């Protein structure tokens, strides 16, 4: 039996016993401002529940299913969310700093301004997720799937994306300073107005990748060890700022002639 009260008034919102399978069922429940701290919610059914402004800190949410739910402004720092499922979940301002989100699935979730600093997101699925203004500094996203994700104004400084899949992602106005992108899949990624100083691109796979106004691209490390499969695009501003310091193989992949490249110095 669990009891959930309102964080503000203390009024009991609901009491619920586990079903015959030992799982708590909260599907469709309105738990706005709910106090769900330190509850045994492993495998809980939270589909389409309203959990906005709720506090889930310290609860066991391993393998819980919260597809189509609302977790806007909810908090769960330092919480075990291993295998958490949140397909198409609304998560504006969700705070899970330092949480364990290994293997969690946030496919097509709206994750604007989420705070996931230092979180463990190894092998997490964020396909098509909207991570606008997300804070992922120091997060571990090794092996994560961010294909077709939208990262606008996101901060991934010092994050680990080794072996991550970013195919088709839009990386606009982001900070990836000191980010590990080794062995990552960057096919069809559009880097726009983003900072890559100190980012490690060793053995990253580039194919039809675009760099627009990434004027510190030359300050990324191990650029000479990038795996380039076909042509890439680098805009003229980036080339003027970085051209002389970019490795020949990277420049050659732009398809520009020697004469055009020489003209950048004029």
Image (tube, grey):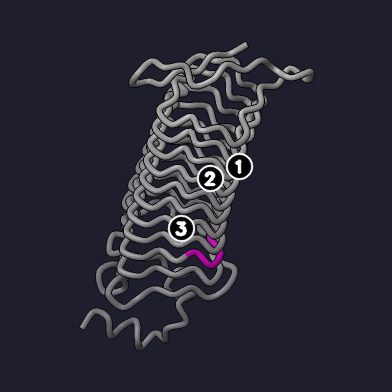
- Residue 148, x across and y down, in percent: 54, 60
Q: Residues within 10 Å of mark 3 (few under 14, many from 20)?
A: many
Q: Is residue 53 above or below residue 89?
A: above
**Residue 80 placement, left or right of 179:** right
Q: How many marks?
A: 3
Does residue 192 sit above or below 52 in this rendering? below
Region in magenta: 184-189
According to the picture, the residue beneath numbered tag 3 turns out to be: 150
Give the alpha-carbon distance from disc 2 to disc 1, as whole Å.
6 Å
Q: Give the mark nearest the N terminus, 2 or 1.
A: 1
Q: Is residue 58 magenta?
A: no
Q: Residue at x 60, y 15 (%)?
A: 40
Which of the numbered marks, if any, corresponds to residue 67? 1
Position above or below: 40 against 31: above
The crowding category of the residue bearing disc 2, from other C-alpha atoms within 10 Å (few below 14, some 14 to 19, many at least 20), is: many
Task: Give the mark, 3 or 2, whose residue is nearer the N terminus.
Answer: 2
Disc 1 crowd rating (10 Å Cα; few below 14, some 14-19, many 20+) is: many
Q: Position of residue 253 (x, y in %)?
A: 49, 74
């Amino acid at each position: 039996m669990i009891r959930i009260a309102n964080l503000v008034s203390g009024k009991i919102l609901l009491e619920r016993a586990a079903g015959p399978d030992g799982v708590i069922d909260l599907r469709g429940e309105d738990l706005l401002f709910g106090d769900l701290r330190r509850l045994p919610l492993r495998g809980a059914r939270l589909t389409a529940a309203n959990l906005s402004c709720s506090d889930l800190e310290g609860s066991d949410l391993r393998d819980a299913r919260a597809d189509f739910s609302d977790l806007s402004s909810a908090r769960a720092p330092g919480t075990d969310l291993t295998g958490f499922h949140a397909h198409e979940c609304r998560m504006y301002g969700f705070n899970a700093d330092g949480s364990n989100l290994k293997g969690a699935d946030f496919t097509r979730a709206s994750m604007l301004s989420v705070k996931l600093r230092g979180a463990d997101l190894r092998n997490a699925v964020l396909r098509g997720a909207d991570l606008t203004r997300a804070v992922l500094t120091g997060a571990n996203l090794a092996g994560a799937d961010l294909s077709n994700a939208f990262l606008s104004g996101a901060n991934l400084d010092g994050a680990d994306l080794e072996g991550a899949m970013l195919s088709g992602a839009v990386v606009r106005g982001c900070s990836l300073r000191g980010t590990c992108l080794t062995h990552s899949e960057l096919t069809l990624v559009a880097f726009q107005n983003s900072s890559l100083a100190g980012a490690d691109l060793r053995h990253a796979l580039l194919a039809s990748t675009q760099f627009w106004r990434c004027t510190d691209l030359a300050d990324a490390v191990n650029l000479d060890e990038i795996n380039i499969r076909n042509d890439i695009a680098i805009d003229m501003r980036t080339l003027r700022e970085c051209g002389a310091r970019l490795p020949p193989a990277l420049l050659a992949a732009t398809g520009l002639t020697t004469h055009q490249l020489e003209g950048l110095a004029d």
